[in-house]
Image (cartoon, helix red, strand yellow):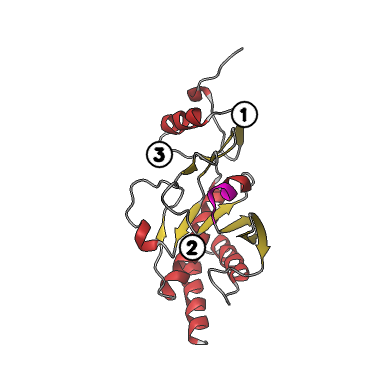
């Protein structure tokens, strides 16, 4: 039987590689070998490791949606801590995932400045963002980690899923932002950023948020 070395594996931009029968200790070795400065994302669930190399369009949409969240939280004067694409792992559940972006809100102060996150003692982020362009989100991994709210953007549509009774349920509104038409606002902003430029789109989104607040 031939055994491939990790350095032999190349994931082309926009492609996904899936590796079966990966033990937890092997996952730890792979993450160490891959390092922190890389252009790939991983997800792991019960022995299956998925490695994805995002495309530029994926990265642009990710940045746009993260800016939406930051602008909204800033204008609402709500504290937050973002950990971007940090690797979140839970050995007991045999799950690991690297979101495109993620946010702590309730635990913003508690999680601020942490150099390492240990989900055996630390809470998972309350919000995770995934761009379903290069590959589909590994829901099992997020379920195992206990992320309460997951935003998935696929092309031009935002889907909001919330953890309810051990499974994700699609919602029409974000419980983290009650009363806000998040889906429509994010979809509109991303489209503006694609057709104009990100500064102008971000400015327009901020003006819309301020107008909504002042109209309350």
Residue 83 in view in this figure:
yes
Judge by depth and name the residue closer to the eye, 2 or 125. Answer: 125
Numbered badge on residue 37: 3
Q: Secondary structure at mark 2?
A: helix
Magenta stretch, residue numbers:
142-147
Alpha carbon separation for disc pair 3 and 2: 25 Å
- Between discs 1 and 3, the one toward the N terminus: 1
Q: Kindly give the residue lying farthest to the bottom in the view shown.
A: 215
Q: Residues within 10 Å of mark 3 (few under 14, many from 20)?
A: few
Residue 155 in view in this figure:
no
Specify the quadrant that holds the N terminus: top right
Mark 2 = which residue?
198
Magenta highlight on residue 138: no
Q: Residues within 10 Å of mark 2 (few under 14, many from 20)?
A: some
Q: Is there a contact, CB below 8 Å, between mark 1 and mark 3? A: no
**Quarter assignment of residue 71:** bottom left
Judge by depth and name the residue closer to the eye, 57 or 96. Answer: 96
- x, y (%) of residue 127? 51, 59
Judge by depth and name the residue closer to the eye, 54 or 122. Answer: 122
What secondary structure is the magenta-colored segment mainly?
Answer: helix
């Amino acid at each position: 039987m031939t055994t491939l070395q990790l350095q032999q594996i190349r994931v082309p931009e926009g492609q996904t590689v899936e590796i079966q029968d990966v033990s937890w200790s092997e996952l730890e070795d792979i993450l160490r070998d891959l390092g922190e400065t890389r252009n790939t994302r991983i997800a792991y669930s019960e022995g299956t490791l998925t490695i994805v190399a995002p495309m530029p369009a994926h990265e642009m949409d990710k940045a746009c949606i993260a800016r939406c969240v930051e602008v909204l939280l800033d204008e609402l004067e709500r504290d937050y801590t973002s950990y971007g694409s940090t690797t979140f792992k839970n050995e007991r559940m045999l799950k690991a995932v690297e979101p495109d972006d993620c946010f702590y809100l309730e635990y913003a102060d508690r999680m601020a400045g942490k150099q390492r996150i240990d989900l055996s003692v630390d809470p998972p982020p309350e919000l995770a963002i995934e761009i379903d362009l290069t590959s589909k989100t590994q829901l099992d991994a997020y379920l195992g980690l206990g992320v309460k709210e997951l935003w998935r953007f696929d092309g031009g549509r935002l889907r909001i899923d919330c953890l309810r009774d051990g499974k994700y349920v699609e919602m029409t509104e974000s419980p983290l932002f009650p009363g806000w038409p998040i889906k429509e606002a994010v979809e509109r902003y991303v489209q503006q950023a694609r057709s104009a430029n990100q500064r102008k789109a971000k400015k327009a989104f901020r003006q819309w948020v301020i107008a909504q607040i002042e109209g309350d």
